[in-house]
Amino acid sequence: MARLGSWIESHPEGIYVRPADAWIDPSEAKPRAMITHGHSDHARGGHGAVLATPETLAIMECRYGPQPGGQSIAYDEAIRLGDVDVRFVPAGHVLGSAQIVLEHQGEKIVVSGDYKRRPDPTCACFVPVPCDVFITEATFGLPVFRHPETGSEIDRLLHRLHADPSRCVLVGAYALGKAQRIITELRLRGHDASIYFHGAIERLNQLYESFGVDLGELRHAGGATKQEMAGHIVIAPPGALNDRWSRRLPDPVTAMASGWMRIRQRARQRNVELPLIISDHADWDELTSTIRELEPTEVWITHGREEALKHWCMTHQIKACELNLVGYEDEDD
Ligand SMILES: [Zn+2]
Ligand SMILES: [Zn+2]
């Protein structure tokens, strides 16, 4: 019998599905690409044909302009590409994020893209698809990475906000996904005051709202006075935290929402006073419990901390290898 998944090629610039003549999340422009989600390290511009969910295509249009080669594929819609049956199923990572399910000659291979298992009010939940080969990310693939309950992190944020109404809390959050999730989680915890935002996340906020995610009352921080913003939450991309921009804010408490906030040194490097451990990636327990649930014969690891997960698979009688893809960065997520 041929090696499992011998019809999939791993190249530094991405995964190539030979019988479909298509790439998955390639880091270079390709004639045909399937895109798991809109983060810029996975969704690059310049491809010929682009297959993605309607949400991901909208995000790509927002970033790169019109996508004339775009072909939108709804979750669970079955398509045939060359000699491969293809389906996109929810990955629970950000709006529109998908795992790509590939079937060819009786083998089923699932490419997870980035994913998480805990509930996220801004996107569809991860759908487990049992498979022969599970191609997974491993951004937080070390046992030290265990994300706490999201609700308790949001409560810490609100507690800090209410402790001193003369200050604001400035939350650094990835512009696509994390920012909108934090806003929505705050709403779910009963925080219905205006939330101020940095101009860099405005279009993505609007895009989420156009897909039915209710963000409540938002205000542009650029048009507000210090006095107005006192006692309020301000959301900005991580790059703005230590930027001149933040001088316009009323004595901000600097917070950051990221799985990396588990590491104290990372928080210190960014002068973060209030680290919030909120991630859009699976933590160690989610990675390992997902593999247990899917029971794949093999696990291939795309990016992240591969060694520990590979070792875990081996001790659980699952063959595992690293694909050594380049160009994926989840530094702030
Ligand atoms: Zn991502
Ligand atoms: Zn990624």
Image (tube, rainbow, N blue to C red):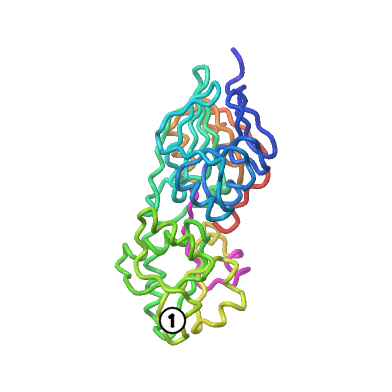
Residue 81 horizontal side relative to residue 292, left or right:
right
Q: For numbered disc 1, what is the local secondary structure?
A: helix
Residue at figure coordinates x 64%, y 45% from the top left: 46
**Magenta stretch, residue numbers:** 265-283
Residue 37 screen position, x and y as percent: 51, 46
Quarter of the image where the C terminus is located: bottom right
Residue at figure coordinates x 42%, y 41% from the top left: 90
Is residue 223 among the parts visible in the rendering?
yes
- Does any atom of ligand 1 lie closer than 8 Å to the CB of label 1? no
Residue tagged 1: 229
Residue 319 screen position, x and y as percent: 57, 28
Residue 258: say if magenta. no
Residue at figure coordinates x 58%, y 26% from the top left: 20
Residue 29 screen position, x and y as percent: 67, 42
Residue 274: say if magenta. yes
Amino acid type, residue under disc 1 in the picture: Met
Front residue of 211 and 140 = 211
Residue 130 screen position, x and y as percent: 43, 29
Residue 165 horizontal side relative to residue 306, left or right:
left
Residue at the left extreme?
Answer: 190
Is residue 310 among the parts visible in the rendering?
no
Instruction: Please state the total of marks drawn on the protein image.
Output: 1
Q: Residues within 10 Å of mark 1 (few under 14, many from 20)?
A: many
